[in-house]
Image (cartoon, rainbow, N blue to C red):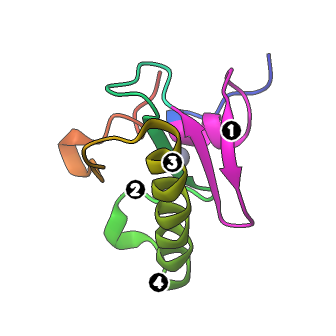
Amino acid sequence: MKNLPTCLGCSIVRGNLPQFTVFENDDVICVLDIDPIHEGHTLILPKHHYAEYTDIPHRIVLSITACITILSNVLQSKFNPEGITLWQNGGVFNDLDSPF
Ligand SMILES: [Zn+2]
């Protein structure tokens, strides 16, 4: 096993955990959640560690937004959901920034 960082999100970004990547660009990787709430539940992770959403540079936020649009279109065409939810867990609700 590779040397694991203490952050679950960064471990996913570095490919240290089993994952299925659905989209990737220079700034962001998008992987299917291992315990999905719904079909197509996807994590959008910046490739650099940011503790909070408000720490993310604007250029990376724009890249995340582009991924949201791409993924939403794919999810709509594949699963035809009644709606798509965007979710950001910060502060005490952040479950990817924890040591594991
Ligand atoms: Zn991290």
Looking at marks 4 and 3 on the same chain, the residue that comes earlier in the sequence is marked by: 4
Q: On the rendered structure, is 22 left or right of 77?
A: right
Q: Which residue is mark 1?
A: 21
Identify the element where label 2 is drawn.
loop
Q: Are marks 3 and 2 in contact (CB under 8 Å)?
A: no
User: Does the magenta-highlighted stretch encompass residue 29?
Assistant: yes
Residue furthest to the right: 2
Looking at marks 4 and 1 on the same chain, the residue that comes earlier in the sequence is marked by: 1
> What's the distance in space between the residues labelled 4 and 2, CA to CA?
15 Å
Dot 4 alpha-carbon crowd within 10 angstroms: few under 14, some 14 to 19, many 20 or more: few
Q: Name the image quarter holding residue 21.
A: top right
Residue furthest to the left: 92
Looking at marks 4 and 2 on the same chain, the residue that comes earlier in the sequence is marked by: 2
Q: Which residue is mark 4?
A: 58
Q: Residue at coordinates 51% horizontally, 51% vertically from top-left?
A: 44
Q: Which residue is mark 3?
A: 77
Q: Residue at coordinates 48% horizontally, 29% vertically from top-left?
A: 33
Residue 88 image offset from top left, x and y in percent = 29, 52
Q: Which residues are magenta?
A: 9-32
Dot 3 alpha-carbon crowd within 10 angstroms: few under 14, some 14 to 19, many 20 or more: few
Query: Does residue 7 appear anywhere in the picture?
Result: no
Q: Residue at coordinates 67% horizontally, 30% vertically from top-left?
A: 20
Looking at marks 1 and 3 on the same chain, the residue that comes earlier in the sequence is marked by: 1
Identify which amino acid the numbered label 4 is placed on: His
Identify which amino acid the numbered label 1 is placed on: Thr
Q: Quadrant of the N terminus?
A: top right
Query: Does residue 31 appear anywhere in the picture?
Result: yes
Looking at marks 3 and 2 on the same chain, the residue that comes earlier in the sequence is marked by: 2
Identify the element where label 4 is drawn.
helix
Q: Which residue is mark 2?
A: 51
Residue 32 image offset from top left, x and y in percent = 55, 32
